[in-house]
Amino acid sequence: MRIDLHTHSRASDGTQSPAELVRAAAAAGLDVVALTDHDTAEGWAEAARTAEETGVGLVRGMEISTRHDGRGVHLLAYLPDPTHPPLLAELERILEGRSSRLPAMLARLRELGVDIDEDDVRRVAGDAVATGRPHVADALVDLGVVADRTEAFRRFLSAGRPAYANRYAAPLEKMLRIVGDAGGVSVIAHPWGRHGRQEPSEATLAELTEAGLSGLEVDHQDHDASARERLRGIARNLDLVVTGSSDHHGSGKVDHELGCNTTAPEEFARLVDLARLAAARSGRSTPEVVGA
Ligand code: AMP
Ligand code: FE
Ligand code: FE
Ligand code: ZN
């Protein structure tokens, strides 16, 4: 069983349509794939149709932009009812923050002498619901300013770089509650990714577990071997589910090929059991795993 629990489509900042993504998962020999676009369930229906055609198991999820102790935390929510009103309201607020941040980033790029406007971004973003910095990066590639997304982030778009602008993210503990009330389960994506610090600490993760957290994404390309080992220990201490994923973005992120990290079948089974419990407790109508 090969299970990859975190991928993106063109509904957010991946480069494949949801159907293409699910077909690619089948071609890569995955048994189960989770579609977890940033802050939207927009790709779910198309992905579910293709999963039924191809026989790949599909977990419908999303990667929600949250904030805790002043830091951004990406929260993977699996199998929630996306129509739960408090969840919808927060997602709308996050998406609105994404849209209204675009003009600010483009204005900063123009101050730096780059001739770019919203049409350039719209052209590359297509029908994405959740627009983000990767789309600005794609526009910069399209205009010949940079060679790829990586260079765009390094020169302009990463936090601290000159075209970076902040945006709204939901309070993490509030979102843990909302996801549970929506009948879903919460896993922190790449908890120690990118910034290089081993934070949130075990003490903080213990508090978050009390607040409703169910798992940690341990096996992720942003974690080196020692981070994975320490996170696995913390998950064991706190009885959290351990997941692994590619965080695939199509051709938008190098070294994140489908199945490059996977989730153990017994951990996946625990996650699905927790989702069933949450769904029953919530009384909401939640999605099933397609093909389960
Ligand atoms: P945003 O959602 O607009 O804040 O942009 C953050 C997203 O950009 C992340 O979820 C990644 O998908 C992507 N990203 C961040 N850093 C890089 C990078 N160096 N190269 C490519 N994509 C990146
Ligand atoms: Fe992304
Ligand atoms: Fe992420
Ligand atoms: Zn992701």
Image: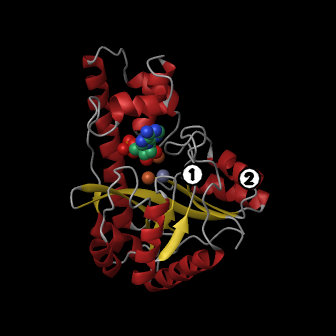
Residue drawn at (59%, 74%) of the image: 268
Q: Residue at x 54, y 82 (%)?
A: 276
For marks 1 and 2 on the same chain, the one whose residue lies earlier in the sequence: 2
Q: Are marks 1 and 2 in contact (CB under 8 Å)?
A: no
Question: Residue 131, which numbered label?
Answer: none
Residue at (33%, 74%) from the top-left corner? 177
In which quadrant of the rendered image does the C terminus lie? bottom right
Residue 131 against residue 178 in the figure, above or below: above
In the rendered image, residue 271, in percent from the top left (x then y), is placed at: 54, 77
Q: Secondary structure at mark 1?
A: loop
- Return the mark for residue 43: 1
Give the residue drawn at x 40%, y 57%.
Answer: 64
Which dot marks residue 28?
2
Asked whether residue 44 is in view, the answer is yes
Left or right placement of residue 33 versus residue 83 in this view: right
Q: Position of residue 102 (x, y in %)?
A: 33, 33
